[in-house]
Image (tube, grey):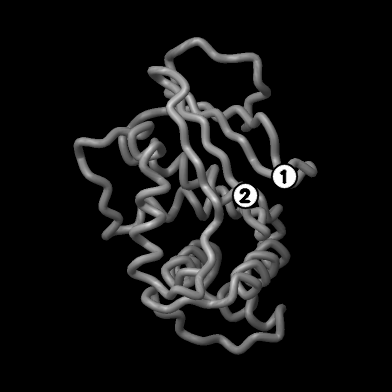
C-alpha cells in the first residue's frame, strides 16, 4: 500500500492522543517506524494498524476508515484542480489511480475502481479489492465533496462486506431527487 496512507495515518492518530500511534503498533506486536510517502508497505500492516486503532479508541473500524478517508482530503498538499467539482473528480479516479501507480512502487496492488457518469448529478462507482476497504473510499468521497463545499449522498447498491463480489456506490450531488437505494449514513 502506498506509503502516504501510513504517514497520514500517523498524523490522524495524533487527533486522539499523542500515544495512540505507539499503542496501535504495540497492540499488533510491531515496532514503531517511520513510513515514507514514496515507499510501498504491506497492505496487511495497514489493516493491522487500523484494527489496532479501532481497539485503542473503541470505535468501529468502518467508522474510523470513513473518518480517515475524509481526513486525507483535508491534508495540506492535496492538489485537486480548481476547475473540477466532486463528480468530475470521481469520474477521473481511474486516471488518478493510474498516475499514482506510475509514481509509486510497482509491487503495490491498487484496488479495481470503475466509474461511470449515470446522470447529470450522479456517478456510479465500482470498487473491488481483497482488502475490502470500502469505508475508506466512502470517506474519501466525503472529503472530496467537503473540499468543494458540496454535499453528496451515497447509495450502496452492493457491498463486498455483505458478500457481493464488488461494492457499487451511486453518488449524487445533493439538492436533486434521490433514487430508491438505501442511503448510507
The residue shown at (20%, 40%) is: 82
Is residue 177 left or right of 163 when viewed as pictured?
Answer: left
* Image location of residue 19, percent across then percent down: 56, 77
The residue shown at (71%, 79%) is: 28
Residue 49 — which label?
none
Q: Nearer the viewer, residue 118 or 71?
A: 118
Secondary structure state at the residue bearing disc 1: loop
The residue shown at (50%, 75%) is: 107
* Image location of residue 147, percent across then percent down: 33, 41
The answer to whether the residue labelled 1 contacts the one labelled 2, judged by CB atoms less than 8 Å apart, is: yes
Is residue 104 left or right of 109 when viewed as pictured?
Answer: left
Identity of the residue furthest to the top in this view = 177
* Quarter of image, res 144: top left
* Image location of residue 52, percent across then percent down: 68, 70
* Residue identified by numbered label 2: 128
Q: Is residue 5 above or below residue 70?
A: below
Is residue 154 left or right of 88 when viewed as pictured?
Answer: right
Q: Is residue 111 above or below residue 161?
A: below
* Image location of residue 10, percent across then percent down: 48, 71
The residue shown at (63%, 48%) is: 63
* Residue identified by numbered label 1: 165
Dot 1 surroundings within 10 Å: few (below 14), some, or many (20 or more)?
some
Q: Is residue 175 above or below residue 150?
A: above
* Quarter of image, res 109: bottom right
Q: Quadrant of the C terminus?
A: top right
The answer for how far apart the CA atoms under marks 1 and 2 are is 7 Å
Q: Nearer the viewer, residue 57 or 177?
A: 177
Identity of the residue furthest to the right in this view = 163
Q: Is residue 8 above or below residue 19?
A: above
Q: Nearer the viewer, residue 71 or 180?
A: 180
Secondary structure state at the residue bearing disc 2: strand
Amino acid at each position: 500500500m502506498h506509503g502516504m496512507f501510513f504517514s497520514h495515518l500517523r498524523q490522524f492518530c495524533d487527533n486522539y492522543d499523542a500515544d495512540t500511534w505507539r499503542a496501535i503498533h504495540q497492540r499488533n506486536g510491531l515496532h514503531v517506524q517511520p513510513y515514507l510517502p514514496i515507499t510501498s508497505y504491506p497492505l496487511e500492516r495497514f489493516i493491522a494498524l487500523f484494527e489496532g486503532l479501532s481497539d485503542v479508541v473503541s470505535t468501529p473500524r468502518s467508522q474510523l476508515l470513513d473518518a480517515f478517508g475524509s481526513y486525507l482530503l483535508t491534508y495540506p498538499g492535496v492538489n485537486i484542480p480548481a476547475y473540477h467539482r466532486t463528480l468530475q473528480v470521481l469520474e477521473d479516479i481511474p486516471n488518478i489511480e493510474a498516475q499514482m501507480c506510475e509514481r509509486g512502487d510497482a509491487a503495490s496492488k491498487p484496488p479495481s475502481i470503475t466509474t461511470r457518469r449515470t446522470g447529470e448529478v450522479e456517478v456510479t462507482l465500482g470498487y473491488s479489492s481483497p482488502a475490502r476497504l470500502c469505508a475508506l473510499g466512502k470517506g474519501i468521497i466525503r472529503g472530496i465533496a467537503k473540499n468543494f463545499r458540496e454535499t453528496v449522498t451515497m447509495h450502496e447498491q452492493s457491498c463486498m462486506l455483505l458478500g457481493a463480489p464488488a461494492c457499487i456506490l451511486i453518488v449524487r450531488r445533493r439538492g436533486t431527487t434521490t433514487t430508491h437505494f438505501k442511503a448510507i449514513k
